[in-house]
Image (cartoon, grey):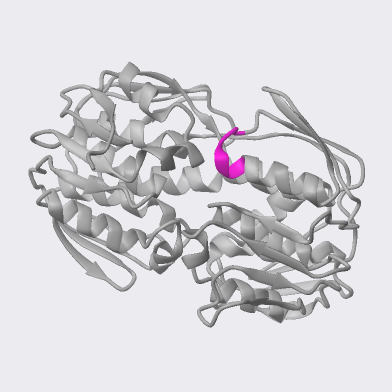
Amino acid sequence: MDLVINPATSITGEIEALPSKFHTQFSTALAILTGGKCTIESPLRVRDTQVMLKAAESLGAVVKRSQEKWTIWGVDGKIKSDKNTLDAKNSGTSICLLTGISTISPSTMVLHGDSQLRSRPMPTFLKALRCLGADVYSTKPDESPPFIAFGGGLKGGKVKLDFLEPRYLPPVLIAAPYAKKKVELKVKSPTLDRISELMKIGHVKVIEKKNTVIIPNQTYRAFTYRVPHEISGTAPFLVAACLTGSSIKINPLGQMTYRDKEFLQCLKSFGINPQISKKCLSLDGKHRLKATRLNLRSTPELLPLVAVIACMARGKTLIYDAAGARTMKSDRISAIANELRRMKAKVLERNDGLILQGPVTLRGCEVDGHNDYAITAALVVAALVSNGITTIKNGADSLISSYSRFISTFQAMGAEISYRHPTV
């Protein structure tokens, strides 16, 4: 289905922050390895998280689903796959987490996905696992899936991983408590402190030192975990309201995730300052958007939406250190650059990011969502602030991988968005 979007003068409303997709996936991965009953409350129920639940069953865990929670009885670190193959569908995070888990399997595991996932090279991820002593390889020269994990466990020991993108740290270390030697990882990463926070969900001890994290040999214990709700999960709605000079309220707010903090910092650098209380976040009226410089090394997934904001900001915006965006569900740097150019944006593509000159008047036209929810969501926002009708091809189906009720939420906020069968 194609999406047809009319320009909007106002995008206003009150919406609920969504549960974190990543925290849903990661807590599910921990539950697989844990011995005992784990309860995950308020999970995000989308295609990319359902992949992890199905994998849990394939790896020997018992799963009970309900609308409000998932209950998982884990395998106590003893992987026993029924088929020795795991299908991650279209989820890059899932295949990385499942590969990390598979390194402690007693038998060989093959991890694969759909054609889009199989086109995503992940050389630094596999190299990092091998540095920890894992016997894991790609079946292709470019280090893209399928992956083969020969199992046998992690050797552990002292490892330096300065080459690793921050997004790969959690899946690389998820099996570290089961390594033969304690893992002493040295890496310069702005997200290193996340490892301790995430792994403590499963009640394991993590020792933090300067640029170093130490994970002794131990096992995960049963837990009850409530998935945090993320402001960043509502980013397209928040940005659309901002660019149309509208009002929006997002609730409830709990403890902010690392991604939330990074997203809010991006907004502030453009001159967007939401009002934040203990219970909600609100944004009112027009903002004087200014160009900025953004380092997206730790959150390259934000690049498409940030690029749309930059089109409306006065001056030249530089987005850099975001090379990781090239190996996500699409090459997000090239994809958003090409589509925004079609809409008459002034965009220069760099190896690790973009340069955008604003403000510009975007023109509605036919664009391609590249079967990537982040590209599609960013283009919907761009379409709402364009002159003329925009049609997005190859995008509608991708939204269900990460967003629940994306189109209906926008429609409730006043957007004119409809579906149309593609012409042959």
Relative side of 213 to 211, left or right: right
Residue displayed at 20% across by 38% down: 391
Compared to 403, does 291 lie above or below?
below
Compared to 57, does 16 lie above or below?
above
Residue displayed at 21% across by 50% down: 310
Quarter holding the C terminus?
top left
Instruction: Residue 294 in the image: state x and y as whole percent.
Output: 32, 59
Residue 173 visible: no
Q: Residue furthest front?
A: 424
Q: Nearer the viewer, residue 265 or 21?
A: 21
Q: Nearer the viewer, residue 286 or 8?
A: 8
Compared to 286, does 401 lie above or below?
below
Instruction: Residue 52 in the image: state x and y as whole percent.
Output: 68, 46
Instruction: Residue 281 in the image: state x and y as whole percent.
Output: 42, 26
- Please give the count of numbered marks on the rendered protein: 0
Determine if the magenta segment contains residue 240: no
What span is in magenta?
Answer: 44-49
Residue displayed at 13% across by 37% down: 386
Instruction: Residue 149 in the image: state x and y as whole percent.
Output: 74, 71
Relative side of 329 to 340, left or right: right
Q: Quadrant of residue 240?
A: top left
Relative side of 39 to 118, left or right: right
Compared to 207, does 379 lie above or below?
above
Residue displayed at 54% across by 71% down: 144
Residue 222 visible: yes
Relative side of 94 to 328, left or right: right
Quarter holding the N terminus?
top left
Q: Quadrant of residue 102?
A: bottom right
